[in-house]
Amino acid sequence: TESPNPDGARARELDSSAVFHSWSTQGGRDAIAIAGGLGSTVWDHDGRRYLDFASQLVNVNIGHQHPAVVEAITRQAATLATVAPNHANLVRGEAAQRILDLAGPAFNRVFFTNGGADAVENAIRMARLVTGRDTVLSAYRSYHGNTGAAIVATGDWRRIPNRFARGHVHFFGPYLYRSEFWAGSPEEESQRALRHLERVIEAEGPSTIAAILIEAIPGSSGVLVPPPGYLRGVRELASRHGILLVIDEVMSGFGRAGEWFAHRADFGDGRESVVPDLVTFAKGSNSGYVPAGGVIVSEAVTAAFTDTVFPGGLTYSGHPLAMAAIVATIDAMKAEGIVEHAATIGAEHLGPGLRALAEAHPVIGEVRGMGVFWAVEFVDDPDARTPVSAAFMAALGAALRERGFLPLIVENRIHVAPPCVVTPAEVARGLALLDEAVTAVEQR
Ligand code: PLP
């Protein structure tokens, strides 16, 4: 895709020649240059438009260029563009209070970070300091960020070349479609996954375990909505052994799952039946308009630092531009009913539409998700559930981009994660493009 616009050509050239890139080789890049966006759409320098069904990296929950958020950042920049975390600052306090109001009565402080990884990093540190224990249990199917402990807590392949932190042990979480436990129903998967976790805790030595760290809905690993009773069961296991439960809501929070926090949804035990000790957030809290994340801290954990120094901090903790973006994001999401809208889109449009696609295409093995947080899994053989080849997924990705659909491809899956503000008409269009692209690749 040659760009006739000189800025587009220059952006693509510099992207190859000057920028060192994440998770990839540094040669032979061919990225789309994004010049602008609005809502669920982005465009390149030549005005080619794309439906952003990845919300970039599943973070632009409020959509691109929401005017209230842009305005709040601009206003804050004109007032005070930066301030150190040791000073009180109104917009930081307002952001913390709004987040606490959403998190529920068990929490009484927010520690702000620059993004998701350092939120996880600091949650792990708090858990270790509070318990005096070392080990952190997390799932093989997980992603927690790209810093010292967070990347080793990550379960997927990315931890392996980065294993420089100690004290991390992994377990298998529930994933009925590829059950590690030979389960035949969601209930059985839940019970057996809990039994496995219990055995890991026993075998590791319960009194050495500081934290169980789990994503409310494992995102990068395939949008693995927990089966009934699983999250509740993990909470009970943690409590029984004096282990802190850290729930990572970096991807699943702030509307993505049609909830402010996915762990407060009803997964078979009623709403709000799981109360973590620490919650990490980032992405959707201000849709990444300015980088931010944080840890929501329960009263009990806060109390451990009443007279004991918390040995952690960041120059940009509670950065005013990021805080102004959080305040404006939460206020706009509330005023416009954006979280409820995301739930409705999932229940009435995206979910049914993706299931219909799965009916029509045997190459789709499973679709799962909630809200605007879905995964479509592609298989060669619906019975054996063998993942399709990397070449199939590359062809599908190209077919989608050609049609103006920006996909997020992970292994043999497309993660369908448009902004929470996506309209029914945009969903219909995205689904039609997906249908066309799958048909085109199937026919090759
Ligand atoms: N935790 C989860 C669940 C994530 O999905 C991610 C990023 O995708 C992170 C942590 C890391 O966040 P960041 O990339 O902002 O450091």
Image (spheres, rainbow, N blue to C red):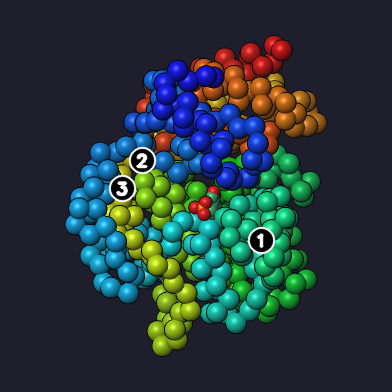
Front position in the image: 117 or 429:
117
Can the viewer see residue 342? Answer: no
Q: Quadrant of residue 318?
A: bottom left
Q: Is residue 189 above or below residue 402?
A: below
Q: Amino acid at mark 2?
A: Ile
Query: Circle 2 sits in a helix, a strand or a loop, which is it?
Result: loop
Q: Label 2 crowding class (10 Å Cα cut-off): few <14, some 14-19, many 20+?
A: many
Residue at the location (73% across, 41% down)?
Answer: 178
Q: Amino acid at mark 3?
A: Thr
Q: Quadrant of residue 212?
A: bottom right
* Contact flag, marks 3 and 2 (Cβ < 8 Å): yes
> Left or right: where does residue 119 sit relative to residue 173?
left
Residue at which label 3 appears: 329
Residue at the location (73% across, 76% down)?
Answer: 205
Residue at the location (69% across, 43% down)?
Answer: 176
Residue at which label 1 appears: 152
- Where is residue 400 drawn, in percent x and y? 56, 21
Quadrant housing the N terminus: top right
Q: CA distance from mark 3 to mark 2?
A: 7 Å
> Left or right: where does residue 402 sit relative to residue 386?
left
Front position in the image: 35 or 141:
35
Q: CA distance from mark 1 to mark 2?
A: 30 Å
Can the viewer see residue 30? Answer: yes
Residue at which label 2 appears: 62
- Where is residue 157 drawn, in percent x and y? 71, 50
Q: Quadrant of residue 160?
A: bottom right
Query: Circle 1 sits in a helix, a strand or a loop, which is it?
Result: helix
Q: CA distance from mark 1 to mark 3?
A: 31 Å
Mark whose residue sits in front, 1 or 2? 1
Q: Label 1 crowding class (10 Å Cα cut-off): few <14, some 14-19, many 20+?
A: many
* Contact flag, marks 1 and 3 (Cβ < 8 Å): no
> Left or right: where does residue 222 sit relative to residue 352?
right
